[in-house]
Amino acid sequence: MMPAWAQMPSPMTTVQLQDLCNSRYDVDAGMCAGYVTAVAERLMIDNNPHQRVCLSPAIAPQILVDNIRNVWAKQPPEAQDLAAQTVESALRQQFRCP
């Protein structure tokens, strides 16, 4: 069986990201964590205060991934949803700035 990352076209859908996040391959899990962390870092420095998320720079990538998985479990994404959009939405729900 080929790892999920080897089969991905661009841009990534949420279903493809879920495959990475749920994979038993370390490389796939690392790509999932890296993707989610990159989206989180971009949102932390967003110039629009209403779009920004409030996270500690020291938050573990696995905590971010676990939070994203929890949101997906409650609100399953559609097959065509783009990963970046669903991750952004989930992070904004979970880590809203005061």
Image (cartoon, grey):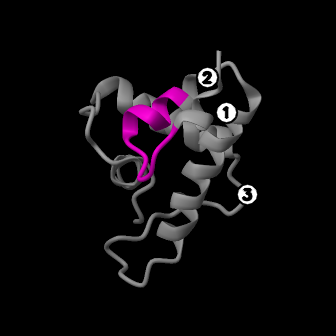
Picture coordinates of residue 35, whole percent (x, y): 57, 51
Crowd class of label 2 (few under 14; some 14 to 19; many from 20; radius 10 Å): some
N-terminal of the pair, mark 3 or mark 1, is 1
Cα gap from disc 3 to disc 1, whole angstroms: 19 Å
* Front position among marks 3 and 2: 2
**The C terminus: image quadrant:** bottom left
Residue at 71% from the left image edge and 24% from the top image edge:
25
Cα gap from disc 1 to disc 2, whole angstroms: 6 Å
Judging by the rendered image, the residue that carries numbered circle 2 is: 23
Residue at 31% from the left image edge and 26% from the top image edge:
74
> What secondary structure is found at the residue carrying circle 3?
loop
Magenta residues span: 8-19
Mark 3 touching mark 1, by CB under 8 A? Answer: no
Picture coordinates of residue 88, whole percent (x, y): 39, 55
N-terminal of the pair, mark 1 or mark 2, is 2
**The N terminus: image quadrant:** top right
Residue at 38% from the left image edge and 42% from the top image edge:
13
Q: Is residue 14 magenta?
A: yes
N-terminal of the pair, mark 3 or mark 2, is 2
Judging by the rendered image, the residue that carries numbered circle 1 is: 29
The label number, if any, that marks residue 58 in the structure image: 3
> What secondary structure is found at the residue carrying circle 1?
helix
